[in-house]
Amino acid sequence: MATLGLVSSQDQVVLDIQREIVNFMQLPREDKSKNIMDIWTRLKKMYPLMYECALVALALPTTQVTVERLFSSLKFILNDQRNRINPSLLEDIMVVRSNYLFDKS
């Protein structure tokens, strides 16, 4: 919140992002056949804040399949005999299991 004409650092970041978006919207559209990471690598210096947001957005799964698989795997871990498992231990088991299920190597 601005007080006495001063802008907080959080407000400044919001203003900087808004400025980047306005400038970005002036660019011509890219061909959909181009690699999105190549495009953002090229635009990284011109739009550093939007680049960081793009990395986060592009890291999100495009489907819910991975989440559904992890929920399905819970039935193998949490059952009637193991219904009081420590949440920290459950999280550790899920990380190990998800690494096993989704490891592409």
Image (cartoon, rainbow, N blue to C red):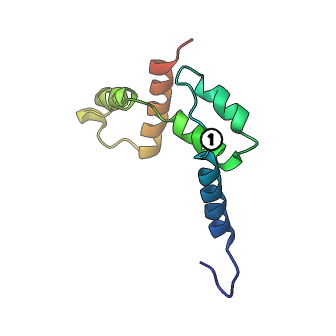
Q: Report the front residue among 89 and 101.
A: 101
Q: Residue furthest bottom?
A: 4
Q: Residue at x 45, y 25 (%)?
A: 97
Q: Residue at x 59, y 51 (%)?
A: 21
Residue 17 lies, in percent from the top left, at: 62, 56
Q: Amino acid at mark 1?
A: Leu
Residue 74 lies, in percent from the top left, at: 33, 31
Q: Report the front residue among 19 and 71.
A: 19
Rendered view: 24 above or below 70? below
87 relative position to 49: left or right: left
Q: Residue at x 39, y 27 (%)?
A: 66
Q: Secondary structure at mark 1?
A: loop
Quarter-wise, where is residue 53 in the image? Answer: top right
Q: Residue furthest top?
A: 105
Rendered view: 2 above or below 47? below
Q: Quadrant of the N terminus?
A: bottom right
Q: Quadrant of the C terminus?
A: top right
Q: Report the front residue among 93 and 105.
A: 105
Q: Residue furthest right?
A: 45
Residue 83 lies, in percent from the top left, at: 29, 40
Q: Residue at x 72, y 32 (%)?
A: 42
Residue 18 lies, in percent from the top left, at: 60, 58
Where does label 1 land, which residue? Answer: 27
57 relative position to 71: left or right: right
* CA neighbours of label 1 inside 10 A, class few (<14), some (14 to 19), many (20+): few
Q: How many marks?
A: 1
